[in-house]
Image (tube, coloured by chain):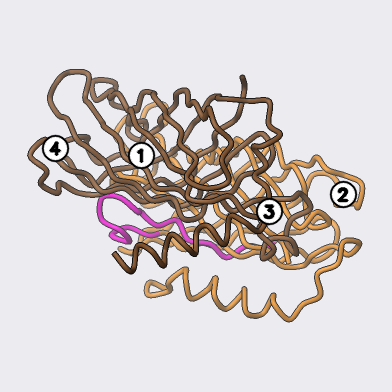
Chain colours: A orange, B brown
């Protein structure tokens, strides 16, 4: 798990996706999501919750049915030391409105487990209030997502904001 | 020199594949926002930064189209208002060409517009000045916006010595005027 590297995961999914038919009328089943990721302290825990730096989130997702979304993702620190801190996670999400061919707007909620390089485990609950596009459009903007992250070992809660996320579905 | 000639020919050939979206554009500039970070702790502390400002792209050339920008940059994660910096620079869109490799994935017509840039970062408390060289290979033009994913920058001090590097996760430039 710790040695898992996102480029390998992305490459594998892109190779797999290449053999799938891309049709304007069919909903895509697989996707790749890239987003910004900002950790912020919350309330009575003012100290910064993770090693400071620039983080991003990228993952691959599977969208069975009309609402479910399962995602395997990583949140690496890119700057100042790339991959000196990385969280690998699994998320189970729910599209709050049914994914339909003529529905461009949606919202999503998900819960995830994040596993850090030093064995740190985090639990997160995220809400994305604005999803524009979807698997029928083969593309989605995910805007202003916010997650409450719980660190059970340190007994603290903090925020993770994702200003912009871009999903491409195959 | 020969390499530069080959490179130039490639850029022009790519640009000749289609007209620049900007040829019909009624805009000359707008607003940008980006998330970025820098490895040079002499300039800014380790943090995720947010930068926002205005840009001007007065021409609509299909290749080597210049733009200038000016804005502020602030470390937001963790938040450090004392590290507020001024960001100025110029960007050169190398070419602007249809992106057929994106047609299968996107409904909208997109154009690939990679760019090179140069600029300056100046801490408003006067503690640091850096010059930057930037490359944005994955830069997509979609109608009235230009989106950049994964840009890269090199930082130099006033003597020209390399001082680190920076990364842009995402940048959106929206034409407004």
Q: Secondary structure at mark 3?
A: loop
Q: CA distance from mark 3 to mark 1?
A: 37 Å
The residue to which callout 4 is attached is B42
Mark nearer the viewer, 2 or 1:
1
Mark 2–mark 3 contact, CB under 8 Å? Answer: no
* Between discs 1 and 4, the one toward the N terminus: 4
* Between discs 3 and 1, the one toward the N terminus: 3
Q: CA distance from mark 4 to mark 2?
A: 50 Å
Mark 3–mark 1 contact, CB under 8 Å? Answer: no
**Residue located at (11% from left, 35% from top):** B158
Q: Secondary structure at mark 1?
A: strand
Extent of the magenta region: A70-86
The residue to which callout 3 is attached is B18
The residue to which callout 1 is attached is B48
**Residue located at (14% from left, 20% from top):** B126
* Between discs 4 and 3, the one toward the N terminus: 3
Give me the chain letter of mark 2: A
Q: Secondary structure at mark 2?
A: loop
Give me the chain letter of mark 4: B
Q: CA distance from mark 1 to mark 4?
A: 15 Å
Give me the chain letter of mark 3: B
The residue to which callout 2 is attached is A98
């Amino acid at each position: 798990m710790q040695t898992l590297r996102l480029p390998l995961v992305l490459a594998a999914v892109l190779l797999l996706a290449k053999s799938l038919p891309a049709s304007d009328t069919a909903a895509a089943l697989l996707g790749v999501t890239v987003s910004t990721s900002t950790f912020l302290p919350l309330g009575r825990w003012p100290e910064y919750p993770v090693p400071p730096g620039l983080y991003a989130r990228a993952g691959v997702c599977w969208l069975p049915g009309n609402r479910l979304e399962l995602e395997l993702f990583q949140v690496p620190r890119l700057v100042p030391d790339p991959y000196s801190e990385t969280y690998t996670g699994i998320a189970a999400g729910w599209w709050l409105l049914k994914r339909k061919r003529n529905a461009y707007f949606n919202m999503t909620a998900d819960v995830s487990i994040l596993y850090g390089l030093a064995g740190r485990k985090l639990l997160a609950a995220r809400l994305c209030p604005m999803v524009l596009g979807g698997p029928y459009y083969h593309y989605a903007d995910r805007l202003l997502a916010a997650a409450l992250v719980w660190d059970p070992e340190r007994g603290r809660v903090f925020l993770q904001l994702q200003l912009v996320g871009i999903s491409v579905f195959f | 020199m020969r390499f530069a000639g080959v490179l130039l020919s490639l850029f022009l050939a790519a640009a000749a594949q289609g007209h620049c979206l900007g040829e019909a554009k009624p805009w000359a500039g707008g607003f940008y926002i980006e998330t970025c970070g820098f490895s040079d702790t002499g300039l800014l502390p380790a943090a995720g930064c947010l930068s926002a400002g205005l840009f001007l792209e007065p021409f609509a050339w299909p290749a080597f189209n210049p733009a200038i920008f000016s804005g502020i940059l602030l470390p937001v994660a963790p938040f450090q208002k004392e590290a507020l910096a001024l960001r100025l620079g110029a960007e050169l869109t190398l070419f602007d060409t249809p992106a057929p490799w994106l047609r299968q994935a996107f409904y909208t017509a997109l154009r690939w517009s990679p760019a090179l840039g140069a600029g300056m970062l100046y801490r408003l408390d006067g503690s640091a000045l850096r010059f930057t060289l930037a490359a944005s290979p994955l830069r997509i033009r979609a109608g009235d916006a230009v989106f950049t994913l994964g840009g890269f920058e090199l930082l130099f001090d006033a003597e020209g010595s390399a001082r680190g590097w920076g990364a842009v996760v995402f940048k959106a430039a929206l034409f407004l005027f």
